[in-house]
Image: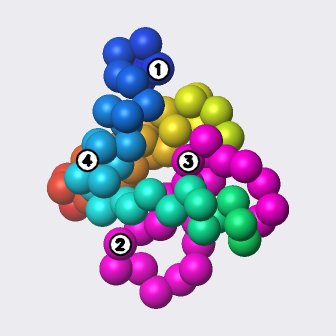
């Protein structure tokens, strides 16, 4: 599903937050020395992994991945 046509970037960020992701764009940009459109960390995760997005398509792909994992998790 192509979210870029149906959802704004703000909508995608809000939806990712409902799946347990917090926006950490400023921290990721400083750490990596790159300007990201947005970056996220999974809440409750002990690792120091940022999910960094440079384009709207990246955000859409992350959201698709997260939603797919959530659906698969419910089926198991």
Closer to the camera in the image, 38 or 75: 38
Q: Who's the residue at 42% across and 80% down the image?
A: 45
Provide residue 56's location: percent of width, then percent of height. 56, 30
Would you name the residue on which mark 4 appears?
Answer: 71
N-terminal of the two: label 2 or label 4?
2
Provide residue 43's location: percent of width, then percent of height. 35, 72
In the displayed structure, 56 sits above or below 31; it is above
Mark 4 lies on a secondary structure that is helix
Mark 1 lies on a secondary structure that is helix
Would you name the residue on which mark 1 appears?
Answer: 4
Can you see residue 72?
no
Q: Check the image and name the residue furthest to the bottom.
A: 46
Give the extent of the magenta segment.
Answer: 32-53
Would you name the residue on which mark 2 appears?
Answer: 43
N-terminal of the two: label 4 or label 3?
3
Nearer to us of marks 3 and 1 is 3
């Amino acid at each position: 599903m192509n979210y870029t046509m149906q959802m704004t970037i703000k909508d995608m960020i809000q939806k990712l937050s409902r799946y347990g992701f917090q926006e950490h764009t400023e921290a990721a940009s400083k750490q990596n020395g790159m300007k990201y459109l947005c970056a996220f960390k999974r809440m409750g995760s002990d690792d120091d992994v940022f999910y960094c997005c440079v384009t709207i398509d990246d955000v859409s792909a992350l959201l698709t991945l997260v939603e797919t994992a959530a659906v698969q998790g419910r089926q198991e």
